[in-house]
Image (spheres, rainbow, N blue to C red):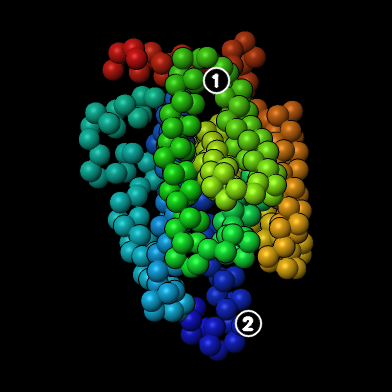
Amino acid sequence: MMPSAGQLHYIAVIVLRSIQGFASGLTWPAMYAIVGYWIPLTERSRFMSSFQGFSIGIGLTYPLCGFILSEWGWPYIFYTTGTLGLGWCILWYLLAFNTPREHPRIAEDELNYIELNVRNEVNSNVKIKVPWLQIFKSIPAWAIAVTTFGRIFVHYIFIVNGPTFMGSVLKFNFETNGFLSGVPFICSYISSVFFCYIADKIVLYKVLSLSNVRKVFTALSQIIPGVLIYCIGYIDNVYILLTVWFIAVIFITASYAGAMANIIDLAPNHGHSAAVLAFCQTIHMSASFISPLTAGFIVTQEDSIDQWRRVFEVSAIISILTYLIYQFFGTAEIQTWNKGLPVDDDDSDEGKVLSTVKDNFDNTVGPI
């Protein structure tokens, strides 16, 4: 519908994009709501890497759109991507279920394994009203929201403004631009699997506390990209610049073993992780339009490297400073308002869950 709306009036495009935004805003909370019922604590980071599937989408869409634009024109970009999106919605509707027990095709062994390892922290039988006020007052939730704002700010500089920089400053054509803009995002999916696998192993064998694991990987996702995006504006060699660009995009995905997984840590029970995500998303997704607006305000001449340097410098500062908020105020402890039960101060929830899950894991597959 977007090409027709574009021919009709720009207001029609704004209306359609607004509808898309509202609809897509439901997607992430819906996915987070079921994670607590499906994924044991020690596999949570690895599962979060699957959310990076959107990076594959971005990585494939850039070169695909560059090719379509060159061959058939911009309307066919919307026809192609829209058709693919509708097809995926049908698959999700047919294959996704709220809980393992509701799944009609799950193997008995898998069902037993999941229920054995999530029952220690997830209470799916007790329904408790969503504690919106407590979530709003939760310092750890605010820490996640703020730090993720910084990560998304930088990420959207790469996603939205990156192709403009490559075309206007580096002088790449549509097809080359699409390829170079897309490759880092495909690689970032692979890196997210790696980061999340390492995080789960660290959690399983208690090398670091769960809170520190989340902070380390959040730091990797914001400090390193923050430093690298600052450097990009001062690199003259295009090959070195692209290498630094790729590395920065790849490290951003470490957040899925960090702050993004931390949302479920805070509230794995009663589906409240969806509410925490909705709260955080309201704040951090504002970066998805503030970031391009900021770049557009600074860059008035698209081929001016000096103006792009200001964009990269602002992005670096925001990325690093927002991480510091998380470093001081972030935690992976289940919040008291999510338990529905009195807090036992003699033993942490994290320790109980990890001990039980590790015993179950070792008994099932043996030590690694």
Determine whether label 1 and label 2 are within 8 Å by CB.
no
Q: Is 208 displayed left or right of 191 in the figure? A: right
Q: Which residue is mark 2?
A: 11
- For label 1, the crowd category at 10 Å Cα-Cα, with few meaning under 14, some 14 to 19 and many 20 or more, is some
Q: Nearer the viewer, residue 144 or 322?
A: 322
Image location of residue 48, percent across then percent down: 46, 39
Residue 5 position (above or below residue 79): below
At label 1, the amino acid type is Glu
Image location of residue 204, percent across then percent down: 45, 19
Residue 68 position (above or below residue 228): below
Kindly tell me whether residue 135 is visible in this rendering.
Answer: no
Q: Which residue is mark 1?
A: 350
* Residue found at x 51% / y 51%: 28
Q: Is 68 displayed left or right of 106 in the figure? A: right
The quadrant where residue 22 appears: bottom right
The disc, 1 or 2, on the residue closer to the chain's N-terminal end is: 2
Image location of residue 222, percent across then percent down: 64, 38
- Which residue is outermost to the front? 237
The quadrant where residue 340 appears: top right
* Residue found at x 33% / y 39%: 100
Q: Mark 1 and mark 2: span between their CA atoms?
A: 50 Å
At label 2, the amino acid type is Ile
The quadrant where residue 57 appears: bottom left
Kindly tell me whether residue 241 is visible in this rendering.
Answer: yes
Image location of residue 106, percent across then percent down: 25, 39
